[in-house]
Image (spheres, rainbow, N blue to C red):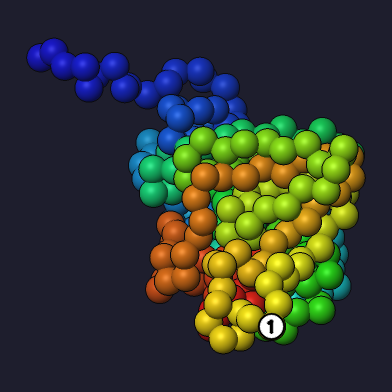
Amino acid sequence: MRSDLFSNTEAGTGQLGFTMQNAKMLKATVNNTEFYARRGAMVGYQGNIRFEYQGITGGPGAGGMKDKLIRAAKAAVTGEGVPLMKVAGQGDVFLADAAADVFLIDLEGADALSINGPSILAFESTLNYDIKLVGNAGAFAGAGLFNTVVFGTGRVAVVSHGHPVVLDCSQQPTYVDPNAAICWSANLNVSLQRSEGFGSLFGRSSGEALQMMFHGPGFVVVQPYEWVAGVGQTGTEGGSNSPVGGAGGVLGGILGGR
């Protein structure tokens, strides 16, 4: 039997951890090790693999019980808990999210990355994470004002709908639609701002009422796609992980979500 299809057989690196199966699929190899992934992101696996509900408590080194309780309280109040599962055992696990492009980012100790919740596919258990307030988000009414910050040493896989652009924020302020932001350097100065005035109250909206402003030494990654309210991601129910009106995003109720 012959077909071009068979050129897409399993990538055989043999190494532990994360590797790219192809541009839209992550391969994670474990051998009595573990990692964390967005719930429902598994599309296939081989071997003896266990999937366990993880919630928002974090992995090894994620802090003591007090820190975990604080993180749980944030998630309960804001609706910002990233729906995670712990994956462990021996074998290979394949992960994807609606045929989105997958990118690997290596964090090296002092690095910290702020990630829009729906863009998280998986991260190694050596990394820690927390839920942080986005810039001046407290000045805006509504829920969904927090984002997920991953930090430490390890590898994280993010997804993008379409090939993204990486914008340097060090020379001048950079403005991004919150529904298109994937991730950014956690040390950046970030603020939310409205660009429309009184006229928008009478239906004269440009559709670009709110932007995120980034400035400082670092970058922001922007996808050529804007999340839409009610459009769910892998492992979600009823679109709950759209940044407009759901968990994990930066907007939540600001733009008319739940």
Residue 195, x across and y down, in percent:
71, 67
Residue 103, x across and y down, in percent:
57, 35
Question: What is the crowding at mark 1: few (fewer than 14 residues within 10 Å), some, or many (at least 20)?
Answer: few
Comparing 188 with 209, the one in front is: 209
Q: Is residue 225 left or right of residue 151?
A: left
Q: Residue at x 72, y 44 (%)?
A: 220
Comparing 91 with 222, the one in front is: 222
| Quadrant holding the N terminus | top left
Comparing 101 with 208, the one in front is: 208
Q: Is residue 33 left or right of residue 60?
A: left
Q: Residue at x 56, y 86 (%)?
A: 202
Compared to 63, does 6 lie above or below? above
Comparing 52 with 177, the one in front is: 177
Compared to 129, does 83 lie above or below? below
- Amino acid type at mark 1: Phe
Residue 37 appears in view: no
Q: Residue at x 83, y 48 (%)?
A: 173
Query: Looking at the rendering, which quadrant does residue 169 occupy?
Result: top right
Q: Is residue 241 left or right of residue 126?
A: left
Compared to 68, does 155 lie above or below? above
Query: Looking at the rendering, which quadrant does residue 235 occupy?
Result: bottom left
Q: Which residue is mark 1?
A: 198
Compared to 139, does 108 lie above or below? above
Residue 171, x across and y down, in percent:
87, 37
Residue 38 appears in view: yes
